[in-house]
Image: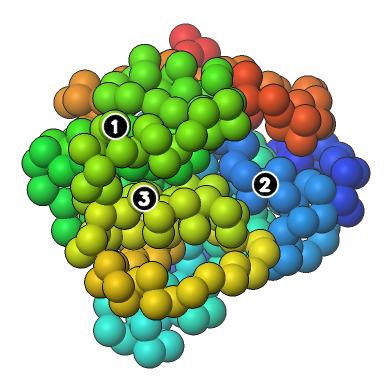
Amino acid sequence: MEILKTVIIQEPFHVEVADRPIPTPGQGEALLRVLYCGFCGSDVASYTGNQPFTSYPRIPGHEFSAQIVTVPENAQGLKTGDIVTGNPYFNCGTCYACRRGYVNCCMENQTMGVQRDGTFQEYITMPVERIYHGQGLDPRILALAEPFCIGYHGVQRCPMRPGDKVLVVGGGPIGIFAMLSAKARGAEVYVCDVLDGRLALAQTMGAYGVCNTRTGSLAVFGTEVTGGNGFDVCIEACGLPETFLACIDQAAFAGNLVLIGNGKRETTFLHSLLLKKELAVFGSRNALQSDFETVIGLLAQGAVDLRPLISRDYTMDTVQEGFETLCHNDGTVMKALLRVTQSTTERE
């Protein structure tokens, strides 16, 4: 019996690297050798016990690149040896949202690494229709396609025109991906955060301007940038009550709000502010196949360079160190990757 190594969160703050049998693909499934995985905030939340949808033990991970080991004949033209990524949100196909085509909003959604085991293991099986060709991308970059899709999907949710002034509240990875997605639509994008390191990276990657809301006034910054008109679009990428309220305050009359950050606390506000400004509020959840295909295309064309986002690599032997580092992240680590295996090309 062939054995794989897998990372298992047995309970909060307790990670083990254990041996398991290599899975056997079912009908319509491919066997994938996982190459790189991104550490997502949801993985860290599972590690700390703050992810309400995680049950234990759990294999984390849903941001990944992999190499196809075996694959059945398929319409996508995928073949053994291809470097790929995949859609980790498993929808039921029968709920009201799925029946209307909103599979990203499935009422019974199961995300890999949260409600079902994820990609922090050497081999996984996956339905062929969920696998997307990497178009020659470096596996380290391809592992970032899924979180990029989260930001991209959110930006696609609202009307946005070239030249619009857009404020992204939160300069973490998802905020940066939202910034890059808005820039791809021709917007003039600004970023605010409380960490100078994140803001410096945002500027390096193309932000028109940044504001540290811990040391400066967002209200003054917004007035200077927009001439007092407010931002055409405000994107909330933190999930905090105060950042949601900041978006309401900074939005222009007849502006748009996009909510990507996953909040864990209730927010109290006067809803008349939404009426007074006639704000449109768009929630955003997961991503669609079209988002993956577009994002991979943008990366393959060289339209966006994600290399500055990658801060550190970890291995199976140092995976707990990775979790601990991210638990105490002061903003100096943007995206951390877990190197799981090597592709056959790398081995050669």
Q: Which residue is mark 3?
A: 250
Badge 3, how many Cα within 10 Å: few under 14, some, many 20+?
A: many
**Residue ID at (44%, 76%):** 271
Task: Identify which residue, 139 or 280, lies in the foreground.
Answer: 280
Task: Identify which residue, 34 or 23, lies in the foreground.
Answer: 34
| Disc on res. 43 | 2
From what the image shows, is residue 1 above or below residue 322?
Answer: below
| Amino acid, disc 1 | Glu
Q: Which residue is mark 1?
A: 224
| Amino acid, disc 3 | Gln
The answer to whether mark 3 and mark 1 are in CB contact below 8 A is no
| Amino acid, disc 2 | Asp
Q: Position of residue 201 (x, y in %)?
A: 45, 19
From what the image shows, is residue 297 above or below residue 136?
Answer: below
From what the image shows, is residue 201 above or below residue 34?
Answer: above
Closer to the chain start, of discs 3 and 2, is: 2
Can residue 65 be seen here?
no
Q: Viewer-nearest of labels 1 and 2?
A: 1
Q: Which quadrant of the figure has residue 104?
A: bottom left
Task: Identify which residue, 191 or 78, lies in the foreground.
Answer: 191
Q: Viewer-nearest of labels 3 and 2?
A: 3
Task: Identify which residue, 51 or 207, lies in the foreground.
Answer: 207
Q: Would residue 284 appear left or right of 262 to someone viewing this image? A: left
